[in-house]
Image (tube, grey):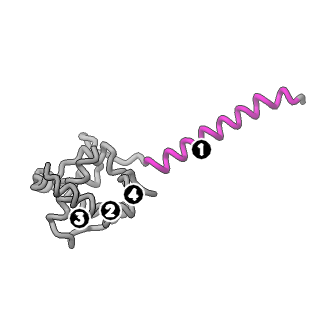
Amino acid sequence: MTSARWIPATLLIASLAFAAAGRARLGAREKVRPTDSRGVLLAIAEAPAKARDAKNPYEGDPDALLAGKKLYVQHCATCHGKTARGIRDAVNLRASEVQNATPGELEWILRNGNLFHGMPSWSDMPEQRRWQIVTYLKSLR
């Protein structure tokens, strides 16, 4: 066989390997996670109606936003990263699947966690601080 015949086969194999590597990298970064009809992660959307409808008492408060950012760095950045885009299997908190959630749903998931997905409960954290974190998270839209 001449080397001219090997070139197309080599290019085909290389392009298939490159495409597979790209899909693997994307899959590691952004997992497809189930959502409800609003596009909210099911783990968050399972919050009861009372929690879902809760209003953030600190919404629009710049001091709460700064406090929430500090709390985020202390408690959340280890898993979700400094930019909140997620590390390893942790959810990208900037993604629409999180940002579409109500403030009440986010406070609920902070309070209750989801150990099945590796999210700890922050029920020992004072409610005010959880709402400050929610204020910060909503600012990431």
Cα distance, mark 1 to mark 2? 32 Å
Q: Are marks 4 and 1 in contact (CB under 8 Å)?
A: no
- Give the magenta part as a residue range: 3-30
Question: Which residue bears the numbered disc 4?
Answer: 81
Task: Find out whether residue 26 is within the magenta segment.
Answer: yes
Identify the amino acid type marked 3.
Asn
Q: 57 or 109: nearer the eye? A: 57
Whichever of callouts 2 and 3 sits on the residue coming sooner in the sequence is 2
Q: Nearer the viewer, mark 1 or mark 2?
A: 2
Q: 65 or 33: nearer the eye? A: 65
Cα distance, mark 2 to mark 4? 8 Å
Question: Which residue bears the numbered disc 3?
Answer: 112
Cα distance, mark 2 to mark 3? 19 Å
- In what element is the residue under mark 1? helix
Question: Which residue bears the numbered disc 1?
Answer: 21
Residue drawn at x 39%, y 57% is 81
Q: Residues within 10 Å of mark 2 (few under 14, many from 20)?
A: some
Cα distance, mark 3 to mark 4? 21 Å
- In what element is the residue under mark 3? helix
Above or below, 20 relative to 49: above
Residue drawn at x 33%, y 65% is 115
Whole-percent x, y for residue 62 in the image: 17, 52
